[in-house]
Image (spheres, rainbow, N blue to C red):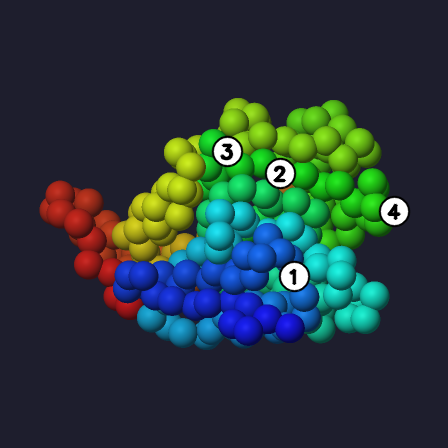
Amino acid sequence: MDSHEPVTVTEPRPGVLLITLNRPHVRNAVDQALADAMDSALTRLDADPELGVGILTGAGGHYCSGMDLKAFPTEGVPIVADRGLAGLTRARVRKPLIAAVEGAAVAGGFELALACDLITAADTAFFALPEVARGLVAAEGGAIRLPSRLPYHVAMEMLLTAAPLPAADAVRYGLVNQLTAEGKALDAALELADRILKQSREAVLVTKRIVQDTRGLDDHTAFTVQDPLSAPVFTTADATEGAQAFTEKRPPAWQR
């Protein structure tokens, strides 16, 4: 049993919640205690009006090695109700979530990254879905999400042969937003968070929800779903302020 908290939660700057998987002795493998702590952190992110962006990273130079296979025989898959692995892979997190990846993001760890909205990664990091080599299936989003994030044949090679994908290739394919030197993935994630926080909070939240609610729909259906979400935004104080700030050539002063 771990002698420390399986997840640490801090606010490195106003508006940002940093969630750090904290089981470095097992490359931040997910057991039930970590899953429950992650779920609590994500609930805090969405519930706290002062928070605008979440960052998910791992301690000890690794992101996450997936499900703790040593705990699996007694604990089973470490899911949280209907929110999936570690309370994330099947959740609908309202606020932007950035994965800051160092070292290994494999199996369920890669699925956690795929559940985030943006990814930064060190140039020494790598991604893999080795479930088939363990007699398992990437059932927490890997087999569903990866083929839409990578070229089909690249995704299928990863899924069917357990082949790893170096971060340098992941950025070339568009899976990773920013590639950094080793140890700098979190810095890049914080910079991305700052860029998001400069925008209208309400517009960001609605934009993410539109993406969540319309993915996979045909255009006609997607507009039908989108319009009731987007229409109120055009009558907000932020919309008026955005137009005035543009006209007056000054930074907008958003309502929070």
Marks 4,1: beta carbons within 8 A: no
Distance between the alpha carbons at the discs numbered 1 and 3 = 22 Å
Which numbered disc covers residue 124? 3
Q: Residues within 10 Å of mark 4 (few under 14, many from 20)?
A: few
Q: Label 1 belongs to which residue?
A: 30
Q: Label 2 belongs to which residue?
A: 127
Q: Earlier in the sequence, mark 4 or mark 1?
A: 1
Distance between the alpha carbons at the discs numbered 4 and 2 = 19 Å
- Under tag 4, what secondary structure? loop
Q: Earlier in the sequence, mark 1 or mark 3?
A: 1
Determine the residue positioned at 63% across, 41% down: 219
Name the mark nearer the viewer: 3 or 2: 3
Q: Position of residue 79 (x, y in %)?
A: 71, 67
Circle 4: residue type: Gly
Marks 1,3: beta carbons within 8 A: no
Q: Which quadrant does the C terminus fall into?
A: bottom left
- Under tag 2, what secondary structure? strand
The answer to which image quadrant residue 144 occupies is top right
State the count of labels: 4
- Under tag 3, what secondary structure? loop
Residue farthest along the right direction in this orientation: 135
Q: Label 4 belongs to which residue?
A: 135
Circle 2: residue type: Phe
Q: Residues within 10 Å of mark 2 (few under 14, many from 20)?
A: many
Determine the residue positioned at 80% across, 31% down: 161
Task: Answer above or below: position of 189 versus 9.
Answer: above
The answer to which image quadrant residue 31 occupies is bottom right
